[in-house]
Amino acid sequence: MAGGIGAILGFVGAKVFLVNSAFILIPWGIAGVAIGYAMAKSVREAGSYGDYFGFVLAFVFMLAGYSGKDPVVSKIWFFAILGFVGAMFGVVTALIGYGLRVLVQRRT
């Protein structure tokens, strides 16, 4: 589910909404926090969901936004590297969301 959300947001960010704008990071960050808050039942799950979300989001964003002259196959390795960077940020945002969930549950 987290990977699917990442794929949709990656494509939308490359083709539809806030194209060529750094402001696209705001809804992506909110989505990562929401994934950690709503889906994760442990720190391990939050990290795993965030990893899938961030990698797929960054990879699909790069793939969908590519408009170069070289074949896209020649750029896959670069997109994968950027996907790993996206995965790191996905983990961070999902852990923030999980942390918020734990804080809210403690207060109730």
Image (cartoon, helix red, strand yellow):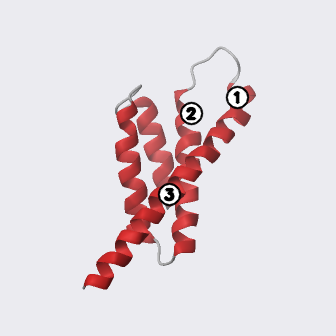
Which label sits in the foreground, 1 or 3? 3
Which residue is identified by label 2?
A: 62
| Dot 3 amino acid type | Val
Left or right of residue 75: residue 102 = left
Q: For numbered disc 1, what is the local secondary structure?
A: helix
Disc 1/disc 3 C-alpha distance (Å) = 26 Å
User: Measured from the top left, where is residue 64 in percent x and y?
Assistant: 53, 32
User: Measured from the top left, where is residue 10 in percent x and y?
Assistant: 48, 41
Q: For numbered disc 3, what is the local secondary structure?
A: helix
Left or right of residue 15: residue 51 = right
Is there CB contact under 8 Å for labels 2 and 1?
yes
| Dot 1 amino acid type | Lys
**Residue 3 appears in the rendering:** no
Q: Residue, x 39% and y 59% (percent of image)?
A: 33
Disc number placed over residue 75 in the picture, else none: 1
Disc 2/disc 3 C-alpha distance (Å) = 20 Å
Q: For numbered disc 2, what is the local secondary structure?
A: helix
Mark 2 or mark 3, which has the lower sequence index? 2
